[in-house]
Amino acid sequence: MEISAPQDEVVRLCQDLIRIDTTNYGPDGEGPGEREAADYVVEQLREVGYEPQLFESQPGRASVVLRIPGADRERGALCIHGHLDVVPANAQDWSVDPFEGVIKDGCVWGRGAVDMKDMDAMILACVRHLARAGTVPPRDLVVVFFADEEAGGVHGSQWLVQHHPELFEGVTEAISEVGGYSVTVPTPEGGDRRAYLLQTAEKGIVWLRLRASGRAGHGSVPNDDNAVLHLAQALSRIAEHKWPREYIASVRGLLDGLSEITGTGYSDEDLEELVEHLGGAAGFVRGSLQDTANPTMLTAGYKHNVIPQEAVAAVDCRFLPGHEESLMATIAELAGDRVVVEVEHRDIALDSPFEGPLVDAMKAALLAEDPEAAILPYCLSGGTDNKALSTMGITGYGFAPLRLPADLDFAPMFHGIDERVPTESLEFGAKVLLRLIETC
């Protein structure tokens, strides 16, 4: 009997997952949670003979874990993980229903098509194929579908690492999202070449609450202790601050490799011409050149003619490896003595080597399907569940392989509108991921 290949069902799996609303509204918001999607994953795994485990950190916040024994049980295990939650989507902003999973213009559309139900579907398709084919991977695989990644993993990866560390016993390396996708860049000869960005580093995260206090009063009376003004001045200083650049190894490797492919030179002070070759992915790269601090929410007042006693802002800070202390000191100085800085969530920066047997296997898996491509390291300006796993000594990479059309502005669709992934890219990714699993 012919056994179906992962690429034969990966599109269906991606559509099914998108149709399950797993919107994560953050720690203070209500939402459907991941339980329905987790139940679907369990059903798909049980259908081929696996017995996965389901864990709920609280009602509705569900993660799924499956360990697949490998041929060499003495080798360190590989964790392959995705997350089931998605960020909110306002249907009025989209040209399609964000939870319909429709196929249009050769793409699967919907919230999560890029971040990251595409990779979830590839993982599912590959491990289902392993079971049907009776294939034993070279080493143990720990396959995880996490809850709550979009709110820092508190109810997902962090909870599992803290409460069930035994699930990750023997795991030495991990792969997940936001890496392994292609960008098409020009060559000096006038042609084009695909380069795959393999994510080897992540900036750290600090989500801050800036709280200014002052003297409440009537809106018609002069007030030299206005909380709104104190906060606005602090945010202005933060916005105007020029964070110094530092080129960590993954960033330098990307810039040097891109310069070699395109023939475009650069200097540490002037690299815009080079970075622009990356198209939509340039934003991720610009975000990895220095620490950043972006105000994202404001709350103050309750009536037009009342000066409030308090004003509050949320600030999203991201720091390069080794920069957490200096960033926090800088923010405190910029905030000033009229604003209190509170930490709501923090997580570490990661920096993994662009070398070793797993990196070699990832490169080989990509080049087997796209022999003329280049493979470059890069630093992610955001974060993934690899942060939580790193606390157990697990080295993480971003590797969700996708060969993308040159004209698809892919990277801006992370958390964007009209999120979509080409069906051919999903099928390509399933083949590459299976090859990696079989050779890792």
Image (cartoon, helix red, strand yellow):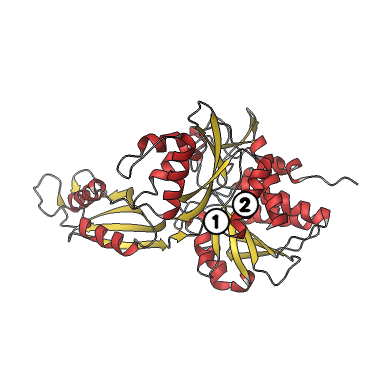
Residue matched to label 2: 362
For the residues labelled 2 and 1, say whether their Cβ atoms are less than 8 Å apart: yes
User: What's the residue type where badge 2 is placed?
Assistant: Met
Q: Is residue 121 visible?
A: no
Residue 18 image offset from top left, x and y in percent: 62, 43
User: What's the residue type where badge 1 is placed?
Assistant: Tyr
Residue matched to label 1: 397
Residue 234 image offset from top left, x and y in percent: 21, 52
Q: Is residue 398 visible?
A: yes
The answer to which of 34 and 306 lies nearer the viewer is 34
Q: SS of the residue at dot 1?
A: strand
The answer to which of 422 and 300 lies nearer the viewer is 422
Residue 55 image offset from top left, x and y in percent: 63, 65
Name the side, left or right, on which 143 lies relative to 225. right
Numbered disc total: 2
The answer to which of 63 and 276 lies nearer the viewer is 276
Name the side, left or right, on which 350 lies relative to 310. right
* Corner quadrant of residue 83: bottom right
Q: SS of the residue at dot 2?
A: helix
* Corner quadrant of residue 202: bottom left
Q: Quadrant of the C terminus?
A: bottom right
Name the residue located 46 percent from the left edge and 46 percent from the top edge. Answer: 254
Q: Earlier in the sequence, mark 2 or mark 1?
A: 2
Instruction: Tell me how far mark 2 sits from mark 1, CA to CA.
Output: 10 Å
Residue 389 image offset from top left, x and y in percent: 54, 65
Position of residue 424 relative to residue 435, above or below, is above
Name the residue located 62 percent from the left edge and 59 percent from the top edge. Answer: 357
* Corner quadrant of residue 5: top right
